[in-house]
Image: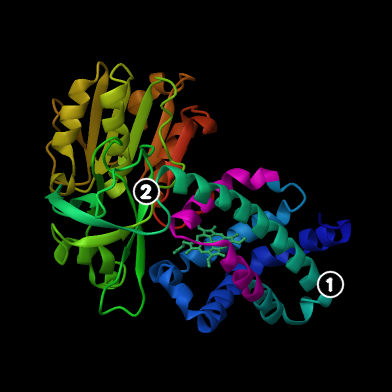
Amino acid sequence: MLSQKTIDIVKSTAPVLAERGTEITTYFYKTMFEAHPELLNIFNSVNQKKGRQQTALANTVYAAATYIDQLEVLLPTVKQIAHKHRSLNVKKEHYPIVGEFLLKAIKDVLGDAATQDVLEAWGEAYGVIAQVFIDVEEEMYETTKEVAWEGFKNFRIVKKEKESEIITSFYLEAQDGTSIPYFQPGQYVTVRLNITSETHLLNRQYSLSDAPGKNYLRISVKRESGEHLVEEGIVSNYLHNQLTAGDTIELTAPAGDFVIDSSNENPVYLISGGVGITPMISMLNDIAEKQPKRPVTFIHAAKSADVHAFKQEIEVKLNKLFNGRKYYYYDQGVNVDLEDNIFEGRVDLTKFKNELIHKENSFYICGPAPFMKSMIDQLESLGVREEAIRYEFFGPSINLKET
Ligand code: HEM
């Protein structure tokens, strides 16, 4: 239990952290990696360079400080982060390292403002916050060990299939021949690659793109391109260009809480932009197999027909449903095709105006941040309740209200 004095100090210094949070976490990562370069095998250097991870950690530390006397408010956020940590094999012994360098960063960046009292209060508070994460993650590790596997495990690529000009699917089987555990549609795995030209192991998360219950796991990877994306594209280009059937990659067990609720058959709207389509395909395929009477509206935005993945697969799955329909939106190069429900321009949800507010509807959204923001704004302005909307970021979560 934290003393009232500690709580008061932490709460009163939280605004300073909010203001200088990114500065503190940037300094924190720099000094931590200098002292513990082995941690570079866990963190994604692209997220670091873009400052995305710094902002995510800063936001969370600030939120934790604000709610330090009622941390249960943060539990849903903690759980989401814990899924990511678990999927990256973050362990309890890592927490004291992060704590040490976070405190050092607060001390060095804030200078005189970081009095002994302030540092002690933050040290104590970090201990409490870290313990919440450690407890949630320990439980996840236990469950994962029982139902799937521990840490990283070798998977063999058994098939590679082109889904569009830029997305390719990889069908993966456990190298040790063990069966594939159940996962929830919408979950992701971490892929770890040891690329000889790189100094560290590289980790990336990819959504599973097929329904559970198969003898393989399928991921579908977008090949990143463009000069400024050289680093961002290392893993995806390596997967696309260097790896082929018979090669092996490492995977952690499925994780994530952006999952379809299969406990009822309420109408669902699966709304995706670009490669955000991948978890939606897993959800659609699962519904087609297990809940064919469930109403599904599949809405997808793609730049053009060339980069529109899974078109045929969606067709097959929608045909299995009693009440499945799709709407596609292309940025360019489309003759409006009303028969195939293809439109030009941005997704316009006012088309569904009268049906959206039915309170049993659920909405699942995945895609680039501006796309998700636009979808959420449209839904909310059409009267959809916040609780009915679920969304998933690719990369560290950011606050959509601030983008
Ligand atoms: C991701 C917070 C401790 C390693 C994240 C994210 C947040 C966060 C907010 C972004 C989640 C997302 O992607 O949505 C925290 C907090 C911690 C903590 C508040 C302490 C209480 C740790 C520790 C490690 C760690 C001890 C391991 C050394 C990572 C990694 C990622 C991550 C590798 C993925 C980000 C990337 O690779 O770009 N954490 N974390 N975290 N965290 Fe932590």
| Location of residue 104 by image quarter | bottom right
Secondary structure mostly seen in magenta is helix
Going by the numbered disc 1, the residue's amino acid type is: Asp
Determine the secondary structure under disc 1: helix
Residue at image mark 2: 188
Badge 1: how crowded within 10 Å, few (<14), some, or many (20+)?
Answer: few
At x 36% / y 64%, what residue is drawn?
203
* Camera sees residue 233: no
The residue at 20%/28% (across/down) is 317
**Residue 77 covered by magenta stretch:** yes
* Residue span colored magenta: 72-101
Q: Residue at x 29, y 41 (%)?
A: 346
Quadrant for the N terminus in the image: bottom right
The residue carrying pointer 2 sits among few (fewer than 14), some (14 to 19) or many (20 or more) residues within 10 Å by Cα, namely many
Q: Nearer the viewer, residue 222 or 170?
A: 170
Left or right of 74? Residue 311 is left
Disc 2 on helix, strand or loop?
strand
The residue closer to the viewer here, 7 or 139, is 139
Q: Which residue is mark 1?
A: 117
Q: Position of residue 88 (x, y in %)?
A: 44, 60
Instruction: Please determine whether, in this image, residue 212 is positioned above or below residue 234.
Output: above
342 on left or right of 95: left
Question: Closer to the N terminus: mark 2 or mark 1?
Answer: 1
Give the number of the mark in front: 2 or 1. 2
Residue 8 is situated, as x and y percent measured from the top left of the image, at 84, 59
At label 2, which amino acid type do we have? Tyr
